[in-house]
Image (cartoon, helix red, strand yellow):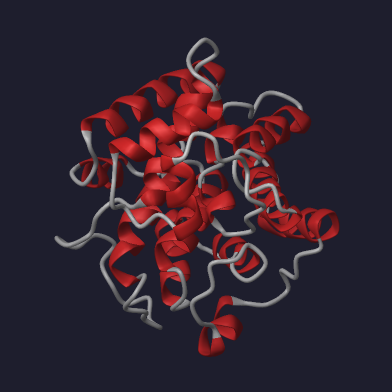
């Protein structure tokens, strides 16, 4: 359903600047909130569900302007408010946290269709090769999981295709890992958190426990883990909706409805 990224974002939101190195936490606390990761995921869903509305870049700007102060990066903030600004070769992990709808909406299509949708919403801003690689690897991993591939097979395919090192474990990464917002310094770690997980919730806890860019890495891990573990329990979706705005809930409802018809 693609709520995985949003649950990861909200759960990780309070740890972005207060890193922890433990999984002994509850997913949701009263001071959790949605951040730019959720806004951009909703925007991507809206873009890919629409074929007659404004351009992809304008739709992304509209969503972000409607949700100010949600932790957007410096260059991305400039881009939001400057309609004449084009892609700026970003390789930030924002490329990977927002692309899950590309995989979910194309789960019954050939892989290339999912990757084309991924490229469409990535190259708006994150057109650096590392940004594209991070977004494509995330989309590819989700698509593989949705099509029944197991963790170890996904690990090998992503390693062979995108040259990410996925042989480490979460326990090996955690002790020395620190805040990193680049695709090359955070996407492989987030993928590992999903592939090593025993459940959807476990993937989110893995990502938060690294002590890095918690909300974004949990969003990436959550988007993969949802597909890998066959969905999310209804209670988690009910809980996360309490933190979201009406327009986000509405677009996710539309996304779910469309995905349901594909299943």
Residue 34 appears in view: yes
Where the N terminus falls, by quadrant? top left
Q: Against 188, is 135 above or below?
A: above
Q: Position of residue 229 (x, y in %)?
A: 52, 48
- Residue at (40% x, 83% y) in the render: 21
Residue 35 lies left or right of residue 151; in this view the side is: left
The outermost residue toward the left is 30
**Count of numbered circles on the image:** 0
The outermost residue toward the right is 160
Residue 177 placement: quadrant:
bottom right
- Residue at (46% x, 34% y) in the render: 60
Q: Nearer the viewer, residue 216 or 2?
A: 216
Residue 72 placement: quadrant:
bottom left
Q: Position of residue 193 (x, y in %)?
A: 55, 66
Q: Position of residue 214 (x, y in %)?
A: 42, 67
Q: Against 249, is 15 above or below?
A: below
Residue 153 appears in view: no
Residue 15 lies left or right of residue 78; in this view the side is: left
Residue 110 lies left or right of residue 69; in this view the side is: right
Q: Nearer the viewer, residue 231 or 128?
A: 128
The outermost residue toward the bottom is 175
The outermost residue toward the top is 52
- Residue at (63% x, 71% y) in the render: 185
Where the C terminus falls, by quadrant? top right
Q: Position of residue 53 (x, y in %)?
A: 48, 14
- Residue at (61% x, 62% y) in the render: 187
């Amino acid at each position: 359903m693609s709520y995985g990224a949003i649950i990861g974002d909200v759960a990780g939101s309070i740890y972005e600047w207060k890193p922890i190195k433990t999984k002994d936490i509850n997913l949701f606390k009263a001071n959790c909130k949605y951040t730019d990761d959720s806004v951009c995921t909703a925007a991507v869903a809206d873009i890919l569900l629409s074929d007659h509305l404004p351009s992809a870049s304008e739709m992304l700007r509209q969503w972000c302007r409607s949700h100010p102060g949600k932790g957007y990066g410096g260059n991305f903030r400039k881009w939001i408010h400057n309609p004449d600004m084009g892609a700026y070769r970003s390789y930030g992990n924002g490329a990977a946290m927002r692309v899950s709808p590309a995989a979910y909406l194309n789960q019954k299509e050939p892989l290339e269709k999912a990757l084309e949708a991924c490229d469409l919403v990535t190259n708006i801003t994150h057109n650096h090769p590392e940004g594209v690689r991070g977004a494509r690897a995330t989309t590819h991993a989700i698509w593989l999981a949705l099509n029944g591939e197991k963790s170890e097979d996904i690990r090998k395919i992503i390693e062979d295709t995108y040259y990410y090192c996925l042989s480490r474990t979460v326990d090996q990464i955690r002790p020395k890992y620190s805040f990193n917002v680049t695709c090359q310094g955070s996407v492989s770690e987030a993928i590992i958190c999903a592939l090593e997980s025993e459940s959807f919730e476990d993937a989110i806890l893995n990502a938060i426990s690294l002590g890095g860019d918690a909300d974004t890495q949990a969003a990436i891990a959550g988007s993969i883990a949802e597909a890998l573990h066959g969905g999310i329990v209804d209670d988690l979706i009910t809980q996360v909706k309490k933190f979201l705005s009406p327009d986000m809930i509405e677009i996710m409802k539309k996304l779910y409805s469309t995905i349901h018809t594909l299943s």
